[in-house]
């Protein structure tokens, strides 16, 4: 199993390296003196090769890097590659290929219209989604996702959009709220300097934003604006992440364990799906494999989980921007490990007794 995981990581790394190589080599070919000197008199063959590189080869390499193959994603990536070719290949070289270039624009346009129709459906369904959230006793991170999944179970675009909505809500709309202090909830960050570390990153981004914007606004206004937008987005994300971490502690119910770590990851674990609880210090201090998701506040010190939940079968977790991934184990570190271990063992024993009945 370990060799298989290592092989997959190697394939992903090689695919990413080749993807960057394909894009950068085509850019250098048309935008450097060395590349322009190496171009032949008849450019049609070279341009066709670049179009195939950016639309077909780059799409396949991207899918290999992400290890997710679907026809829909492949078509979207090919259209994106054709649009990218319009910017990388000088327009005078594309005079004979305008039909192919407009094909990419047309596909992207149809996809945008489709996504806009989904957005309209989301807005139309906001009232029932809000009613479902208000009637739920779960934390907002979980109740909101459940309500959206109920209405739109397989719409990736809407899940990404809703993830962004949560980010802005936690960043700007939760500063007067207080975290839950119920007996069945446990915080994950107070034994670390994680929030202090996040705050330092925000300060560093602010300083970098001011400095880079001042340096670049006279030389490259476009690059300056792009970096400014990315840095503002990063600040909003870190603010929302801090608030989500503070306001959504780990929660233990009778049948489920609800655990999240800021906006980056969350998971619902039924106790009936837990095979065992690992507390052996030797095992907990080992390197965490890729098949294990960790809910651990890390700062400058090396820390280890308090316990490891081994699952009977892989359970899906929701990651950044609504990405879904399944894991076999869950590593957890809480601020009150003794009370947490006690209640988890009690709930697990109850679930095992219920299965025997």
Image (spheres, helix red, strand yellow):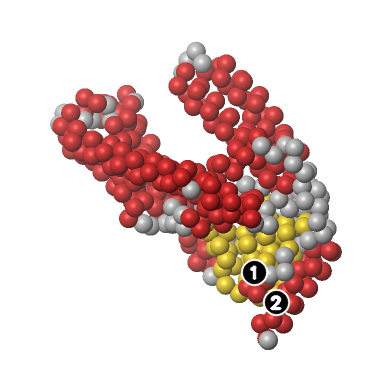
| Left or right of 324 on screen, residue 100 | left
Q: Which mark is residue 270?
A: 1
Please determine whether, in this image, residue 199 is positioned above or below residue 323.
above
Residue at x 65% of width, y 35% of height = 172
Please determine whether, in this image, residue 244 is positioned above or below residue 279.
above
Where's residue 119, x and y in %? 43, 43
Local packing at callout 1 (Cα closer than 10 Å; few below 14, some 14-19, many 20+) is some
Q: Quadrant of the N terminus?
A: bottom right
Can residue 45 be seen from the camera position used here? Answer: yes
Please name whichever residue, 250 or 26, is drawn nearer the observer in this view of the structure: 250
Question: Which residue is labeled 2 in the image?
Answer: 351
Q: Give the mark nearest the N terminus, 1 or 2.
A: 1
Residue at x 34% of width, y 52% of height = 72
Please determine whether, in this image, residue 210 is positioned above or below residue 113.
above
* Circles 1 and 2 in contact, beta carbons < 8 Å: yes
Mark 1 falls on what kind of element?
strand
Please name whichever residue, 293 or 43, is drawn nearer the observer in this view of the structure: 293
Where's residue 299, x and y in %? 74, 45
Where's residue 211, x and y in %? 61, 20
């Amino acid at each position: 199993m370990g060799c298989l995981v290592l092989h997959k990581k190697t394939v992903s790394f090689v695919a990413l390296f080749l993807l960057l190589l394909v894009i950068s080599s085509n850019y250098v070919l048309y935008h450097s003196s060395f590349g322009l000197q190496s171009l032949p008199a008849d450019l049609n063959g070279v341009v066709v090769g670049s179009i195939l590189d950016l639309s077909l080869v780059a799409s396949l390499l991207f899918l290999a890097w992400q290890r997710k193959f679907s026809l829909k994603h492949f078509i979207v990536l090919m259209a994106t590659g054709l649009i990218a070719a319009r910017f990388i290949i000088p327009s005078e070289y594309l005079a004979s290929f305008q039909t192919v270039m407009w094909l990419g624009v047309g596909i992207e346009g149809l996809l945008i219209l489709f996504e806009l129709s989904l957005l309209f459906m989301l807005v139309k369904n906001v009232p029932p989604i809000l009613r479902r959230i208000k009637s739920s006793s779960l934390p907002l991170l979980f109740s909101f996702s459940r309500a959206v999944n109920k209405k739109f179970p397989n719409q990736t675009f809407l899940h990404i959009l809703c993830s962004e909505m949560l980010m802005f809500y936690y960043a700007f709309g939760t500063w007067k709220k207080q975290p839950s202090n119920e007996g069945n909830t446990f915080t994950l960050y107070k034994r670390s300097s994680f929030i202090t570390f996040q705050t330092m990153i925000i300060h560093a981004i602010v300083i970098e934003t001011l400095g880079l914007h001042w340096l670049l606004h006279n030389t490259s206004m476009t690059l300056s604006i792009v970096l400014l937008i990315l840095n503002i987005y990063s600040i909003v994300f870190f603010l929302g992440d801090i608030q989500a971490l503070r306001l959504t502690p780990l929660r233990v119910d009778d049948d489920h364990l609800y655990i999240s770590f800021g906006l980056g990851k969350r998971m619902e674990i039924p106790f009936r799906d837990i095979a065992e609880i690992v507390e052996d210090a030797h095992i907990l201090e080992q390197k965490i494999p890729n098949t294990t998701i960790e809910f651990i506040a890390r700062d400058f010190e090396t820390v280890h989980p308090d316990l490891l939940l081994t699952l009977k079968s892989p359970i899906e977790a929701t990651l950044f921007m609504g990405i879904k991934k399944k894991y076999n184990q869950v590593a957890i570190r809480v601020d009150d490990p003794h009370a947490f271990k006690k209640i988890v063992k009690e709930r697990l024993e109850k679930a095992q007794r219920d299965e025997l009945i």
